[in-house]
Image (spheres, rainbow, N blue to C red):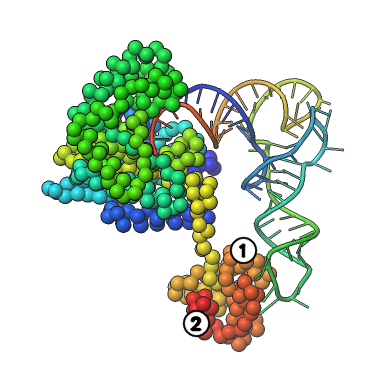
Amino acid sequence: MKTHAPKGTYDLLPQNASRWRYLEEKIHKIFREYGFGEVRTPIFEHTELFQRGIGETTDIVEKEMFTFSDRGDRSITLRPEGTASIVRAFIEHNMAGPGAMAKLYYLGPMFRCEAPQAGRYRQFVQFGAEALGSNDPRVDAEIIALVVNFYRRLGIDDLDVNLNSIGCPECRPAYRERLIEHLKPKASQMCPNCQRRLERNPLRLLDCKNATCQQLTADIPLITETLCDDCGSHFEKLRQLLDLSGIHYRINPRLVRGFDYYTKTVFEVLAGDLGAQNALCGGGRYDGLVEMCGGKPTPGIGFAAGMERLMMVLEARQLMPEIDERPHLYLAPLGEEAQKIIFPLCIRLRESGWIVETDLQGKSLKAQMKAADKLGARLTGVIGEDECRVGKILMRNMETGEQELIDVAALSEYLQTVLRGS
RNA sequence: GUGGGCGUAGCUCAGCUGGUUAGAGUGCCAGGUUGUGGCCCUGGAGGUCGUGGGUUCGAACCCCAUCGCUCACCCCA
């Protein structure tokens, strides 16, 4: 019997879970404000969806998916990212009415079987959005504004927003050829990885971190200079919109991304102190994806962001607020007669919305006071033999230490005035 | 998949060149008032020293293997 969670997974215990809830609420809130509706798709899909959607040659599909057969011998995969499922649901539920747009978001666990390390897990939580049905650059700008403002709201003020356009099936092949032509003579000097990439996916050479590879690609032609008219003007308009909205960004012509489906706009948001896993979120436009997944040709753009990394940054910078989950009241019975009064009282108070704790182990008063203190209860109510006889409860203010005897029947009003009155 | 670091109490860690019953802090439980928390004091519970093998009179310590965790490369969120 293994008594530990599988590699790359973790348990969220109550104290941390409440911090997650806090963040999740912030996420739901901003998506509402920007007009995105939540979609909850299954956590597993037919393997084929990811193979076709993400791309057969990506690392994710090649070696990082949790794939297994179900009883009916169907190949099933735990979702490694969110976009493919959203696109599938979009097609399946016919959200693509003529002229209609769908703005959808998700939040939930994703699965990739890679070696875990700082800020990277095998089961991890991503949130993201997909805007389907418009190729207007305003959609791109809206998505970027959303993520930037989200992180800003949380107090992250040194965002590094990287922006690029990687063209479309019209103009990218020509750039690709130019790249290969330009780099082929230098192939022998490149890292083994890049030598392989040169034929298969030369754009990825641009973001190789290897120093010599960087040098070799230092003087290559920039993709932003070879975009077709359509891509060029799209990019230009996007930049204008961002400028007008006060969103700071940096054009990074070396920014390319791991998935095959991206077209035109790609972006990444970094936060300075994340170390090796420095991307807070990333995304881009994918005008061919819906069609590739079996839907009508529909343009789209989206992003995905990691929760664990966001949490890391917020914690490192002490931007997580203290979450007050202290009980309003701790009820301490002494003896069985008192328990018979306190137990139902406790239940009734909770039903009217108070956060109430009580002893369930038969501890001494001293131990109960201690427990009340540790839980941070604002008030403690004691009922012993004396109080039982007269139908009273001794209320102690845990902050000031003041105590007063009140009627049990009057407890509700007492709580109202003491806890909500001031 | 490749390389580095680390596995001792629930948690954070000591444990000197191998030497008796393995320690501290914190947390937990109880007591110091017979019905009162925080501070303080006392006591208690809690450890297959990751696991297996080897060296030795003797191993938490040395050697080998193995598992796990972790960081980095790769890739990504």
Q: Chain of mark 1?
A: A
First along the sequence among labels 2 and 1? 1
Please state the horizontal and vertical placement of residue A210, each as a whole percent of the image: 45, 23
Q: Name the outermost residue toward the bottom.
A: A390
What residue lies at 36% left-to-right and 26% top-to-bottom? A206
Callout 2: chain:
A
A40 w.r.t. A55: above or below: below
Residue that appears at 21% across and 28% down: A171
* Residue A153 place in picture, x, y as percent: 41, 54
Judge by depth and name the residue closer to the eye, A311 or A338. A311
Q: Nearer the viewer, residue A172 or A46?
A: A172
Among the 4 quarters of the image, the one containing residue A25: bottom left
- A311 on left or right of A389: left
Q: Would you name the residue on which mark 2 appears?
A: A413
Residue A330 is situated, as x and y percent measured from the top left of the image, at 57, 71
Crowd tier of the residue under label 1, counting other residues whose Cα lies within 10 Å: few below 14, some 14–19, many 20 or above: few
**A374 is higher (above) or lower (below) than A116:** below
C-alpha distance separating marks 2 and 1: 26 Å
Where, by quadrant of the figure, is residue B56 drawn?
A: top right
Of the residues shown, which amino acid type is indicated by label 1?
Lys
Residue B12 appears left or right of A238:
right
- Tag 1's secondary structure? helix
Image marks 2 and 1: residues in contact by CB distance under 8 Å:
no
x then y, percent, for residue A90: 22, 46
